Image (spheres, rainbow, N blue to C red):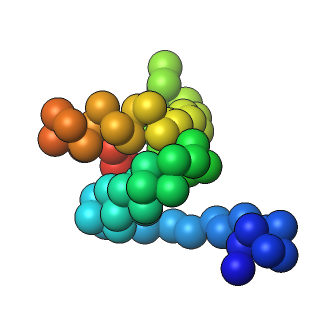
């Protein structure tokens, strides 16, 4: 439906399973259409760090955490 209506989904979650599930679906569709905005401290300031599909793939393979 998002493709047909040309809209994006913005969601928030602390669930690793939800993030990895969304990544798995994007990978099955062969589309690099998912990214995670992770809030973290950088030099004492909260910054948004973008994690794209390539980061999620690596995290999935290595069992790394992507949530703050």
Residue 35 in sight here: no
Looking at the picture, how far across and down is residue 5, in whole percent?
83, 75
Residue at image coords 64%, 66%: 10
Residue at image coords 66%, 68%: 9
Residue at image coords 34%, 38%: 57
Of the pair 67 and 6, the residue shown nearer to us: 6
Looking at the picture, how far across and down is residue 11, in whole percent?
56, 69
Residue 24 in sight here: yes
Looking at the image, is 36 positioned above or below residue 43?
below
Extreme right residue here? 5
Of the pair 4 and 38, the residue shown nearer to us: 4
Q: On the rendered image, what quadrant is the N terminus found in?
A: bottom right
Of the pair 27 and 42, the residue shown nearer to us: 27
Extreme bottom residue here? 1
In the displayed structure, does residue 65 sit left or right of residue 55?
A: left
In the displayed structure, does residue 34 sit left or right of residue 18?
A: right
Extreme top residue here? 43
Looking at the picture, how far across and down is residue 3, in whole percent?
74, 68
Looking at the image, is 44 positioned above or below residue 38?
above
In the displayed structure, does residue 16 sit left or right of residue 1?
A: left
């Amino acid at each position: 439906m998002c493709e047909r209506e040309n809209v994006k989904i913005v969601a928030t979650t602390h669930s690793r399973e939800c993030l990895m599930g969304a990544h798995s679906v994007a990978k099955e569709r062969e589309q690099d259409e998912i990214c995670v905005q992770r809030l973290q401290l950088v030099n004492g300031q909260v910054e948004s760090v973008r994690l794209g599909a390539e980061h999620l793939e690596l995290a999935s393979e290595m069992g790394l955490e992507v949530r703050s």
